[in-house]
Image (cartoon, rainbow, N blue to C red):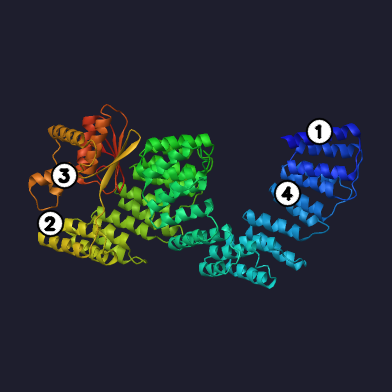
Amino acid sequence: MKVKQKLHQAIDLLYSNGPTSFGDYTRLVLHCVRANDFIQAKRLQSHMELHLFQPKDSFIHNQLIHLYAKLGRLADAQNVFDNMTKTDVYSWNALLSAYAKMDMVEKLHVVFDQMPYRDSISYNTLIAYFANNGNSGKALRVLMRMQEEGFQPTHHSYVNALQACSQLLDLRHGKQIHGKIVVTKLGENTFVRNAVTDMYARCGDIDRARWLFDRMINKNVVSWNLMISGYVKLGKPDECIHLFDEMQLSTLKPDLVTFSNVLNAYFQCGRVADARNIFSKLPKIDEICWTTMIVGYAQNGRDEDSLMLFGDMLRRNVKLDNYTISSVISSCAKLASLHHGQVVHGKVILVGIEKDMLVLSALVDMYSKCGVTLDAWVVFETMPIKNIITWNAMILGYAQNGQVPEALALYERMQQENFKPDNITFVAVLSACINANMVKEGQKYFDAISEQGMTPTLDHYACMVTLLGRSGRIDKAVDLIQGMPHKPNCRIWSTLLSVCAKTDLKSAELAANYLFELEPHNAGPYIMLSNLYAACGRWKDVAVVRSLMKEKSAKKFAAYSWVEVGNEVHRFVSEDHSHLEAGKIYGELNRLISILQNIGYNPDINIVLHNVGEKEKFRSISYHSEKLALAFALIRKPNGIEPIRIIKNIRVCDDCHVFMKFASITIGRPIIMRDSNRFHHFFDGKCSCKDNW
């Protein structure tokens, strides 16, 4: 502030004394530039014009052009240039730089073409502008023109050109530039060497990048960061971590860019605890590190931790961007945490990114996965611009929530508005047909994939296998698989196995045998085939499959349910006694079972496929995880009117489905359950799926 005051006083004195010397004007303009003081610069310019001062060269006016351009005062910069009696290449470069800074590409071209003389800075300004603004092809063409017109590229020329090659993934052109760098002996410059290494890493030749990196004499932090980042982006987290360990043994200290990449690497390896350990020890944390942690937690199935960390981020007033917020919204969607999703939606509005496509698409998906398709529709309809991702999210949201007519009508509207469906669109439409058991319509949409000029993917075939299988046409499903142009993968065989009933054991055994070969350590196929044998009373075959499962060390993943109550997510497994309120939960559940039995509910012990007594079967079926979750919600909010939202990570069983229908009558509240297949909206004894899931 004192500097600006002194500058103001000096120019006041200048106005009191009249014209001054070239040296005084030069010193004053330099002070204005150092202080970024537009007002005093304008006063100085006015004083020179008032006294008809004509400098002997262009230096003073060039400084004014640079200052005005830097401060975004383009009209003032152009005015100085237009009134100069004598211009030189520095004047033109100053004006060129001004238009580059203001992102006025048309004017940039005009000024460059009008220049009576150019130097390497003129070309470098254009190369840098195009390379930094997504016009990499133009950047390389300017470099070529520079050489054709007899100018020798500088290290700035090559660094920006290499950046352009990286953006284009143009390794061939990048190698050519590297060769010219070697010939001109600019390769020993660390700035240039880093750019070459980065180009090879980004273009996928990580081994060549490492070879160059290892031979660098004067590595700096940027050198290490580029190499570490290269490994992360190519999905080689172990190499990234090893290099980070090496860096810590050097004299250079990692910065936040280093730590952000290393956190990413730990998450790629599934080493969540190590990532958290590093994060907690950082003396200073920027928004990139926060975002890396939030996204990393979400990608490793730790969505609750992701939301908790986001809360910490808000409390510390860390700047939020669209990528961070969209990641948090996705975590809310996975957890069906409507409360947290609504809070984040509020933050979206406060931050001012309520028109961001990435965020809005995530909100549509979140509200749909929370079973609130009306709110999803409001977000969708108020979007200023829609893209295919948004259309797909809304169509799939309707399909999963059993609103099949709405899903198919939206698909038709999408086409009317000239949006071409993609592979995900057809997965959404076929899912709608599955949920309504619309075989004929499903076949029509499946045929439409080829009519749109696309090839059906394995996901589309899996949808058709499900649709045919659930309608009892297992033979047609098998024929479809055998006639596929693709080799069936695990999903295809798992889908077939899941739709086989006890009357389709031959097809079930066919699918299971393929799965035993493809995924010998996955317990799912063993359990599904074992359950089919048990349903037929073939206990010897059950024992054989169980023995094979043990021999292959196949691991069964836990089936669980969770419910959000009081802004907290509570998770349960079947016959779970670990919860702090387990006694109350079981008391409430037993009370509810007794009430439901009086109005017609009878636990279906026949679905317990274990050779045990009826009491054991009753206990096993009565305390499934979703029932415990419902009982807990009723304890915490016995008189609530809001829907109870329960998420289950596998398909809901027949008995629990019947139980929820009866429960919705007794408690007088909607129950919204999302299982691995679809949504179930239970109310007044009915389910939105119409018992088709």
Q: CA distance from mark 1 to mark 3?
A: 88 Å
Residue flagged by tag 3: what amino acid is it? Ile
- Contact between marks 1 and 3 (CB within 8 A): the answer is no
Secondary element at tag 3:
helix
Number of the front mark, 2 or 3: 3
Secondary element at tag 4:
helix
Residue at mark 4: 99
Residue flagged by tag 4: what amino acid is it? Tyr
Residue 12 percent across, percent down from the top left: 84, 32
Q: Residues within 10 Å of mark 3 (few under 14, many from 20)?
A: many
Residue at mark 2: 536
Mark 1 or 3, nearer chain start? 1
Number of the front mark, 1 or 3: 1
Which residue is depicted at the point 41% across and 50% down? 277
Residue flagged by tag 1: what amino acid is it? Gln
Residue flagged by tag 2: what amino acid is it? Cys
Placement of 415 over or under 313, stated as above or below: below
Placement of 565 over or under 333, stated as above or below: above
Mark 4 or 3, nearer chain start? 4
Residue at mark 3: 621
